[in-house]
Amino acid sequence: MKMKKLKGPLASVMCSLALLTAATFSSCQKDSSVTPPVATVGSTAASNSIDYNRHHGTGYIDTTHKSTGGTTTGTTGTTGTTGTTTGTTTGTTGTTGTTTGTTTGTTGTTGTTTGTTTGTTGTTGTTGTTTGTTTGTTGTTGTTTGTTTGTSGSTHFTYKASAPISLSNQSNITISGDSINVGNGSTVGIRLSNCSNVHITKCKVMNSTNDGIQLNNCTNVTIDSCFITNVRAGVNAMYSTTVKVNSNQFLNMNGPFPSGNFVQFNNVNGGGCQIKYNKCEDIVGVAQHPQDGLSVYQSNGLPGDSIMVIGNYIRGGQVLHDSGGAAGIVLGDVGGTYQVARYNVLVNPGAVGAQVQGGSHITMDHNTIYSTATPYTMVGIAYGNYSGAASSDVTMSYNKVKYYQTSGAEMDAWWDPSTASQPQGWTTNILKATIDASILPSSIITLNL
């Protein structure tokens, strides 16, 4: 069971902004699973730039009914070649020749006889020019335009109604296209136990007082492009290895504590573990007891292959003081190692925006976190070691934060010096940031029931 968050009297520890000025950095090796952009305060990298649309545009199912129309343009005909052929023929010029001969006669008795013979002049040939012009045929130039109207119909993915699914000891399977309405019963929507190499994709799970999807002792499971709503928790992965929860949508988690998460990793270990590009929303007055949004609890990645919590949208969270302080994102929850939270965007996510609760080789950077004053808000980013074990190599840097407490006072960052040293990079966090609720689109849940 998870511990409550932010121990100690809030009145004394949360007003001490002087604690933020210390700058004691450890020399531990940093987790380099994902290398953030080189950033300085005020730079593009520090402003948490990422192409969210590219990532969030994948994996989702368009449920809009549309008519498809098309216009076909015919091929343009070939234009023939117009050519002119000019030829010139010159007649052969005959040879003009002169033959001159001199004959000397025999000397007579009384005189000399001289004779001259002139050769015949050769004939001069005719010089003639022949010019001919040939005009090629001009081809036909034509454009054919045709309009084809597609059949009016739906472009959305077709789901099939399904009863809850429970599988044990299964391998190499895909669960796709199932729409599971538990009808407010207590059955898990999709439950896997001791399964491996499973892909759950394009499914809907709704209306359960239990978990939407639950994994127990499973290996290599990918959950993507699913919609989960009105359940105790969205995805609850326990004692499993290599779990990926990517590009899903979660709406209204009901809890109660210690459940109520969009995604819970509970003793999830090994390489390739991910919680990426999900869209998550708890609506005030609809979600009953939402708690930590994305929780990584006693879980361990690998050096160079951390558990990745990347690029998620979270709006809404804790609405009642029934857990001691729930957060939008929690790393190192009661310990764990090799975890990274980066490029997430959170609005009004609960008592705390994002926090590290212990563990080692933990990085939380380049996130954007905002909250108005609500009946339960306390602080934007926080670090304290409540795991009961040593906590080291914790980095919290370049997070952009503006967070209002219930009183209306702004409280962007806090760490508990009685339990841990100041996180590395602490002074690079961008506090009192110029941000508001518009850091998220007005609508982030696009799937319909």
Image: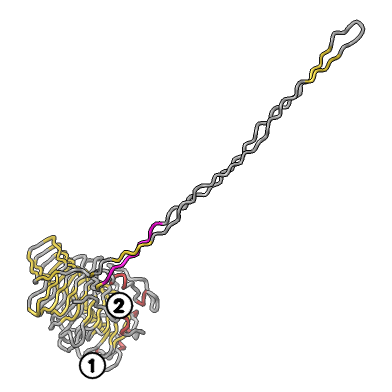
| Closest to the observer, 349 or 340 | 349
Could one spot residue 143 in this view of the protein?
yes
User: What's under tag 2, amino acid-wise?
Assistant: Asn
In the rendering, at what x and y percent does residue 64 appear? 25, 73
The quadrant where residue 320 appears: bottom left
Q: What residue did someone put label 1 on?
A: 11
Which tag is nearer the camera, tag 1 or tag 2?
2
Q: Describe the element under mark 2 as helix, strand or loop.
A: loop
CA gap, disc 1 and disc 2: 26 Å
Q: Is residue 55 left or right of residue 218?
A: right
User: What's under tag 1, amino acid-wise?
Assistant: Ala
What's drawn in magenta, residue-wise? 66-75
Q: Earlier in the sequence, mark 1 or mark 2?
A: 1
The quadrant where residue 32 appears: bottom left
What residue is shown at x 62% (from left), y 39% (from top)?
Answer: 130
Could one spot residue 23 in this view of the protein?
no
Q: Quadrant of the N terminus?
A: bottom left
What residue is shown at x 66% (from left), y 36% (from top)?
Answer: 128
Task: Reply above or below: 219 against 378.
Answer: above
What residue is shown at x 29% (from left), y 70% (from top)?
Answer: 55
